[in-house]
Image (spheres, rainbow, N blue to C red):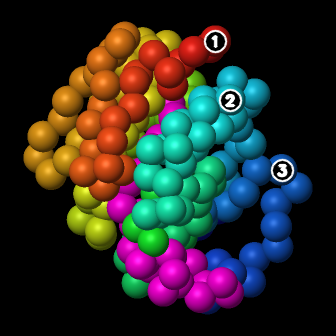
Amino acid sequence: MSTGAVLMTVDEFLRLPEPQTGHYELHHGDVVLIAPPKWGHEEIQERVRELLKRTIGDRGRVRVEMAFRPAPEYEVWRADVGVVRKERADATPPDTYLQGAPDLVVEVLSPSNTAQEINDKMAVCLDNGCSSFWVADDNLKEVKVTEGDITRRYTGTATIASDLLGGSIRVDDIFQGS
């Protein structure tokens, strides 16, 4: 939507009318129209949300399509699933966006995602408060977890342990029935 010559600010972005379908995000000052997720994508998002919520309990908030501002200007994004520690969630006023990236971000791959797009989102999130970035790939039935400079690949009955969550999640529970 941007001409590339002028970056859109968050204030300008917030004045845009809602699109007829999908939602807008602001990436590096450019407006990006994100198509609505398909049924299978939503199923995995919801399953991940339930697993994360069960694991973290009342120590944090878990949301599907969590809106956040990873950087102070030119950025308004959504995580497929986001986890925020309770203290951060409680400190976020209801009429604002979460400042910085969620503590844990889960992106469920869609056919339209590019490696460059996912790598950019991961870098921006990890540089702005995210401690764990997960990429769930339904085709491969795997989850790649990046923390710092280390990426680990989990498949099948493997469990993803997380200090933030205070427990672990089995990979095959994420992809059950998909």
> Residue 175: x and y, percent?
53, 18
Give the labeled residue for mark 3: 21
Task: Give the structural element (helix, strand or loop) at label 2.
Answer: helix
Query: Disc 2 versus disc 1: distance between alpha carbons?
Result: 9 Å
> Residue 48: x and y, percent?
54, 37
Quadrant where the N terminus lies?
bottom right
In the rendered image, which quarter is residue 161 located in? top left
Start-end of magenta stretch: 87-109
Q: Residues within 10 Å of mark 2 (few under 14, many from 20)?
A: some
**Identity of the amino acid at label 1?**
Gly
Q: Residue at x 49, y 13 (%)?
A: 139
Give the labeled residue for mark 2: 43
Q: Residue at x 50, y 21 (%)?
A: 173
**Identity of the amino acid at label 3?**
Thr
Above or below — where is 82 with respect to 175? below
> Residue 115: x and y, percent?
36, 34
Residue 149, disc: none
Q: Nearer the viewer, residue 33 or 97?
A: 97
Q: Residue at x 31, y 55 (%)?
A: 164
Residue 177, disc: 1
Does the residue at mark 2 contact the one at mark 1 (Cβ under 8 Å)?
A: yes
